[in-house]
Amino acid sequence: MQKNLYLILILFSLSSCYTYQVKKQPDPAADNKQDAKKNTASVNTPPQNSNVQQVPTPINVREKLAAGKNFKIDVDGKSYKIIVDRWENDSLVAHPVHHPEKTLKFHKNQINSERIAEKRFSQPIADIITITAYAAIGVGIWSLLR
């Protein structure tokens, strides 16, 4: 029983409630479809701009990567977990998460803007860890009373 308890404690110490999540960009085509549905529901005439194709707006890498935050980025097919230090003209200056002495520089055109993931708190993972901890405590108390 003690071996299982130690294993559970080690697993909890290694787990984290923070995950890297890619922000979803609002889809302008979906917004136009919803607006068109509203227009057709209120008026029985078809929308005039339904045949016009809209080009998705490009994602500005410089605005997305704010200084002092943790990100996971893809650069030329390689993945990096970084903390952004600053921008120098069109170059991102950052350092790896656990190596503040090492400096990385990337040009904004090298960074895959669709795969920029920000480190955020994940409530579902926190809930799973909490429920599992309560269950482990309950099992521990039950085994002591038995």
Image (cartoon, rainbow, N blue to C red):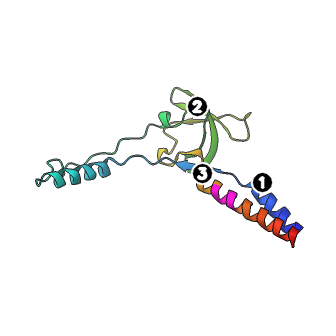
Q: Which residue is mark 3?
A: 122
Could you tell me how far apart the alpha carbons at marks 3 and 1 are, in whole angstroms? 16 Å
Looking at the image, which residue sits at the far front?
145
Could you tell me how far apart the alpha carbons at marks 1 and 2 are, in whole angstroms? 29 Å
In percent of width and height, residue 13 lies at 77, 54
* Range drawn in magenta: 127-131
In percent of width and height, residue 20 lies at 59, 49
Is 115 part of what is drawn in magenta? no
Task: Rate crowding at label 2 as few (under 14), some (14 to 19) or many (20 or more) other CA atoms within 10 Å.
Answer: some
Asked if disc 1 and disc 2 are in contact, CB closer than 8 Å, the reply is no
Left or right: 133 in relation to 81: right
The quadrant the N terminus occupies is bottom right
Which of pointers 1 and 2 lies earlier in the amino acid sequence?
A: 1
| Position of 65 relative to 29 (above/below) | above
Looking at the image, which residue sits at the far top?
89
| Position of 87 relative to 141 (above/below) | above
Dominant secondary structure of the magenta stretch? Answer: helix
Q: Is residue 1 visible?
A: no
Which of pointers 3 and 2 lies earlier in the amino acid sequence?
A: 2
